[in-house]
Amino acid sequence: MKFNDIESIMTAKVAEYIAWGYTLSTGTMSGSQGEVAKVDVVKNMRVVRIMLTRENRYDDNGCYFALTLTVGCHTLPKARSFDRIIWNRDLEVIERREFFSVDIDANNFTENRDDLIEQHKKQMQRWRNRNARCKLSLSKDITSEAAKAIVLPFIRRQNRCKRAKVEDIESVIRFIPSSSAKMHYAITLRNGKTYNLA
């Protein structure tokens, strides 16, 4: 499920209340309480707030993000109180739906906690694999006749190296400068020049 799908669910919920005769209540919507978005509708002194909130959560399975779609109501005490802020904590919750993601930037949400745990396991395995690969490849000399033959066409494309031979290559080193950088190869020639092949 994408964020656009969650927005569509929220829009459908607002449309549902408008179809029941509710109108927008702009006076009670002022003031942010940290929501991603909120819409207040009113009918007969009863304000219904449809809001989307976001929070970071932690549990035994790790860190994850939760988007919560909450529909709550609040009855106004008198007709002239339509221009006052209604605090989220004062709402009587009618319904609530939660959407979870291990990476909110990935734009991939689920309502199933078991799916979230599986996503988190995959994310952690990818992280462990990348760290293991970085440790193995941090600076590994892979100089061999086969490695030299593979990088020779790259060397020949460099300035003043069109006639280079395999014998001119001194070393080929697989290298990752840090865990966040991409792997590349450092190719050193016998004349002392080094070229990086990403």
Image (cartoon, grey):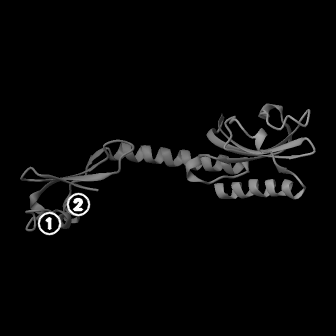
Q: Secondary structure at mark 1?
A: helix
Q: Nearer the viewer, mark 1 or mark 2?
A: 1
Q: Nearer the viewer, residue 144 or 153?
A: 153
**Which image quarter holds the C terminus?**
bottom left
Which residue sits at x=16%, y=66%? 157
Give residue 57's quadrant in the image: top right
- Identify residue for label 1: 156
What residue do we see at 87% from left, 59% from top? 19
From the viewer's perspective, tell me whether residue 63 is left or right of residue 143.
right
Q: Is residue 195 left or right of residue 130?
A: left
Instruction: Please rate how many residues cluster around mark 1, counting C-alpha atoms within 10 Å: few if below 14, some from 14 to 19, many from 20.
Output: some
Residue 71 drawn above or below residue 34: below
61 horizontally vs 197: left or right? right
Amino acid residing under circle 1: Arg
The residue lying at 80 percent from left, 45 percent from top is 25
Q: Amino acid at mark 2?
A: Ala
For mark 2, what is the residue?
147
Between 36 and 81, the one lying in front of the other is 81
Assess disc 2: are there few (<14), some (14-19) or many (≥20) residues with their C-alpha within 10 Å of its C-alpha. Answer: some
Q: Does residue 102 appear in the picture of this structure?
A: yes
Residue 171 image point, x, y percent: 17, 52
